[in-house]
Amino acid sequence: MTDIKAQNMKIRCVIYDCDGVLFDSIEANMRLYNDLCAAVGRIPLREEEIQYVHTHTVYEAIHFIFGKGNGLEKKALEALKQIDLRNYIVYLKMEPHLFQALNRLKENGILRAINTNRTTSMKHIMDRFDLWPFFDMVVTALDVKHPKPHPESIEKILQSFSLSKGEVVFIGDSEVDQQAARSSGVPFIAYKNGEIEADFHIDDHLDLIHFLV
């Protein structure tokens, strides 16, 4: 892991992805989409589908799983309307040392933001885990015309806080996150994923504090 300070970077804001970074959400996502599969009479998720739904919006995931523009997709979208997404939030597992890291960033005047491809479920997550006091901004797929990997969501955060690209780092765990960071020109930190190219790699949220604060 490279020391950001050694790169002469003055970081004023840390942007976090949600799924896979703030939370281990594999079980929650699998339960949701497998319930949709059952509702329309389809087999459970395949391995490649599990990986896809982990990083894409709910509508992109439904397109991918059920096929775009056919009857099965329409049934899945109708079934989604009947589902209370709050029922799946209980299966989210917060990543270790998250609150400690967020508190340290806050104490040092470093802004914290979330950039996620989640939609309506994000508000319920923020409420359930009492995350609102820890973040200065939350950008979901509903807040932009083009969600990740498009750079719009990161650019929205930069503009809101009047930050330059060199004053921000984006922490993600997937190629979608990596592409979003690259396309926006901000440094990318890979969380618990040594297989993707990144400016830095960390395996614990406190790792960030050790070289950022």
Image (cartoon, rainbow, N blue to C red):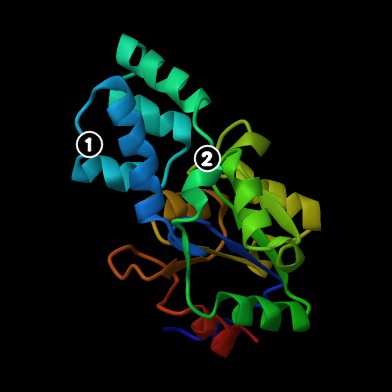
Give neighbour class at mark 2: few <14, some 14-19, many 20+ (Cα, 10 Å): some
Residue 44 numbered tag: 1
Residue 171, image x, y percentages: 51, 65
- Which residue carries the number 2 mark? 85
- Residue 130 at least partly seen: yes
Say left or right for 158 vs 182.
right
Look at the picture and state if 11 lies above or below 89.
below
The local crowd at label 1, few if under 14, some if 14 to 19, many if 20 or more residues have their Cα within 10 Å, is some
Q: Quadrant of residue 98?
A: bottom right
Number of disc labels: 2
- Image spot of residue 71 (x, y percent): 33, 10
Q: Is residue 206 above or below residue 30?
A: below
Pick the residue in front: 177 or 163.
Answer: 177
Dot 2 falls on a residue whose secondary structure is loop
Question: In the image, which disc is placed on residue 75?
Answer: none
Estimate the spatial distance between the alpha carbons at disc 2 and disc 1, rounded to whole Å.
19 Å
Q: What amino acid is found at the position of numbered circle 1 in the picture?
A: Pro
Compared to 6, does 148 lie above or below?
above
Asked if marks 2 and 1 touch (Cβ < 8 Å), the reply is no
Q: Nearer the viewer, residue 163 or 72?
A: 72
Query: Residue 204: percent from the left, percent from the top?
Result: 45, 80
Q: Secondary structure at mark 1?
A: loop
> Residue at coordinates 50% horizontally, 84% vertically from top-left?
207
Q: Residue at coordinates 65% horizontally, 87% vertically from top-left?
A: 213
Front residue of this view, candidates 162 and 102: 102
Quarter of the image with the N terminus is: bottom left
Sooner in the amino-acid sequence: mark 2 or mark 1: 1
Which amino acid lies under the numbered mark 2 shown in the image of this protein?
A: Leu
Q: Residue at x 55, y 49 (%)?
A: 116
Determine whether 119 is above or below 25 in the image: above
Residue 70 in sight in this render = no
